[in-house]
Image (spheres, helix red, strand yellow):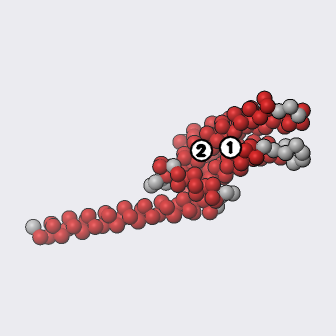
Amino acid sequence: MALSYNFVTFLIVFLLSISVTLTSVKGDLIDDICSKTLKKAVCLSALRADPRSKGANLEGLATISIDLSQKKAKSTHDLVSTLLKQATDPNLKTRYSSCLENYNDTINDLGELSGFLKSKDYESLNIHASAASDGPSTCDDNFSGPPTESPQLKNDSDNLQGFISIILVVSNQLKGMLNA
């Protein structure tokens, strides 16, 4: 009887230590991923704020970053649409029209990512995430001279590029695991 009590105690302690170890490894996974992104602070803030990230593996973090990217792309598209309607300067109207097209392309590219992740096609996930990052970048490039880009648009664009860079880092790590 004492042997079974000792064994059960050992088993409980062992399982608890594994649980603590796995939790700390997951925290390290977020740090590891975010340290390789374009915007470490954006990455850390976004992933840590999402309750799904607790205990998430690479695929879980990819899902979260895809969701964040899709939401940000849609809200930024809506912002550009509003800015276009409010613009009176013909140069701004042209730039915002171009940005609207850029964000349409980004939204389309991001819409394909979940399927690639589910099918474990990490190469296509990476390629289409990279293509999605072109939209906000190209939009920003439209404002190289006066009139300047809206500060809110610039901030949203930067955050979106930060979210997409999470997908790129994670997809590269997932590709590496397949090739190992």
Q: What is the spatial separation of the Cα atoms under label 2 and label 1, in whole angstroms?
A: 16 Å
Q: Earlier in the sequence, mark 2 or mark 1?
A: 2
Left or right: 158, with 16 as reference point: right
Tell me which corner region of the image, top left, top right, bottom left or bottom right, holds residue 173.
bottom right
Tell me which corner region of the image, top left, top right, bottom left or bottom right, holds residue 81.
top right
Depth order, front residue of 58/146: 146
Query: Above or below — where is 117 with respect to 83?
Result: below
Give the residue at x 63% y 44%. 69
Query: How many residues crowd around disc 1 within 10 Å: few (fewer than 14), some, or many (20 or more)?
Result: many
What is the x, y in percent for residue 176? 59, 58
What is the x, y in percent for residue 124? 65, 45
What is the x, y in percent for residue 148? 85, 45
Q: Amino acid at mark 2?
A: Leu
The residue that label 1 is drawn on is 128
Residue 68: give its label. Answer: 2
Depth order, front residue of 122/129: 129
Q: Would residue 123 be visible to someone looking at this image? A: no
Give the residue at x 79% y 37%. 99
Q: Would residue 20 be visible to someone looking at this image? A: yes
What is the x, y in percent for residue 84? 79, 32
Quarter that holds the N terminus: bottom left
Give the residue at x 51% y 49%. 50
Q: Amino acid at mark 1?
A: His
Residue 76: give its label. Answer: none
Q: For the image shown, how many numbered marks are present on the structure?
A: 2
Quarter that holds the C terminus: bottom right
Give the residue at x 79% y 31%. 86
Marks 2, 1: nearer the viewer: 2
- Dot 1: what SS? helix
